[in-house]
Amino acid sequence: EDSVRVVATGGNTLVVGNAELRGPSPVFPGRLRLAGFVDAGTVWERGGGPGSGPALRFTPGVGLRFVTPLGPARMDVAYNPYNLPAGRLYAIQSSGDLVLLSEDYRRTRKSGRGVVFQFGVGQAF
C-alpha cells in the first residue's frame, strides 16, 4: 500500500464557497487579527443524472493574520473530516501499460483526512 499514489480525477463541474470572520487580536491588535473560516465545495462529472454529483463538503478552520512590511501574511489550521472516496486502482506494467486491479479501491490509511496547516502571503480571497 505504500506504493499506492492517489491522483485526483476531478470532473467538469465545480462549486466552491468560502466564508471568513476576522477580528482584532487581544495582543498587538494593530498588527495581528484572528480569523475563523469555513470552506465548502464539491466537484463532479456533469451529465450523470440527478443526484450523481458528490455531496457538498465543509472544512472549518482558524487562523492568524499578520500585517508585515511585505503585505498580509496568514497562518491557518483547518480540519478535513472526510475520507478519500473509493476509486479505480491501476498497476503500471514494465511495458508502461495500465492494468485495472480494482473498480472500488479504498485506502485503509487515514489519507486525505485530518488537521491541515497552511502558511500564505497575501489575502486568502
Image (cartoon, grey):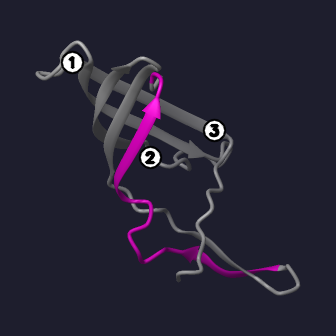
- Per the image, the residue denoted by label 3 is 13
Q: Which mark is residue 23?
A: 1
Give neighbour class at mark 2: few <14, some 14-19, many 20+ (Cα, 10 Å).
few
Q: Quadrant of residue 68?
A: top left
In magenta stretch: residue 100: yes
Spot occupied by residue 71 in the image (x, y as percentages of width and height) = 45, 18
Q: Amino acid at mark 2?
A: Ala
Indicate the position of residue 6 as horizontal and vertical percent values.
Answer: 58, 66
Magenta range = 98-123
Q: Position of residue 117 (x, y in %)?
A: 36, 47
What residue do we see at 52% from left, 68% from top? 86
Instruction: Identify the residue at image location x=29%, y=39%.
Output: 61
Give the secondary structure at mark 1: strand
Q: CA distance from mark 3 to mark 2?
A: 13 Å
Q: Is residue 39 left or right of residue 106?
A: left
**Which of 10 and 2 lies nearest the eye of the viewer?**
2
Please report whichever mark, 1 or 2, sits nearer to the chain's N-terminal start.
1
- What crowding class fits label 3: few (fewer than 14 Cα within 10 Å), some (14-19), or many (20 or more)? few
Q: Nearer the viewer, mark 3 or mark 1?
A: 1
SS at mark 2 in the image: loop
Q: Identify the mark at residue 55; answer none if there is no mark.
A: 2
Residue 73 placement: quadrant: top left
